[in-house]
Amino acid sequence: DSVKVYSEDGRILFPGPVGGDGRVDLSPYFGSDLTIPLEKDTTEYYYLHLIKQGLDVDTLQIDYRTSIDDCNEKRFTKINFYYNEKLVYSNAGEQRGFYVELFKE
């Protein structure tokens, strides 16, 4: 199987291929120059392209909010992750960052 993950603007987040462990790791902001919106509910979409016998496109949706903590660092204060419109992860606690791991079943 060939897997690639793209952002809405066409930026490639995961170029493939999937390793022997069947895992895809995504960190949309790590090592990028993208600005994370502050004090604003934000929704972003990513698209997982699976090429097996044709093209299958899955949708990843991330809803989040960030704020500045007491140490003047940006923190995620809400994260909801949807896979093909199904909520698969939710956290309303404070986090420094997030990443997504997808596993092949």
Image: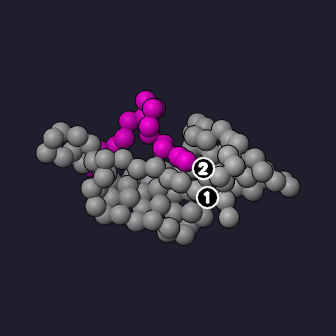
Q: Residues within 10 Å of mark 2 (few under 14, many from 20)?
A: some
Q: Is 38 included in the stretch rendered in magenta?
A: yes
In the displayed structure, 85 sits above or below 34; it is below
Q: Quadrant of the C terminus?
A: bottom right
Marker disc for residue 26: none
Q: Earlier in the sequence, mark 2 or mark 1?
A: 2
User: Which residue is depicted at the point 23% across and 40% down?
Assistant: 73
Tell which residue pokes out farthest to the left in this image: 70
User: Which residue is depicted at the point 47% across and 61% down?
Assistant: 81
Q: Quadrant of residue 38?
A: top left
Query: Tag 2: residue type?
Result: Val
Q: Secondary structure at mark 1?
A: strand
- Residue stretch rendered in magenta on the structure: 24-39
Asked whether the beta carbons under mark 2 and mark 1 sit within 8 Å of each other, the answer is yes
Q: How many numbered tags mark residues here?
A: 2
Closer to the camera in the image, 66 or 19: 19
Q: Residue 90, position in %: x, y?
A: 40, 65
Q: From the image, tell me which residue sits under label 1.
A: 103
Q: Residue 24, position in %: x, y?
A: 60, 49
Q: Is residue 10 visible?
A: no
Predominant secondary structure, magenta span: loop
Q: Secondary structure at mark 2?
A: strand
Q: Residue 11, position in %: x, y?
A: 58, 36
Q: Residues within 10 Å of mark 1 (few under 14, many from 20)?
A: few
Closer to the camera in the image, 66 or 40: 66
Query: Tag 1: residue type?
Result: Phe
Q: From the image, tell me which residue sits under label 2.
A: 24
Alpha-carbon span between mark 2 and mark 1: 6 Å
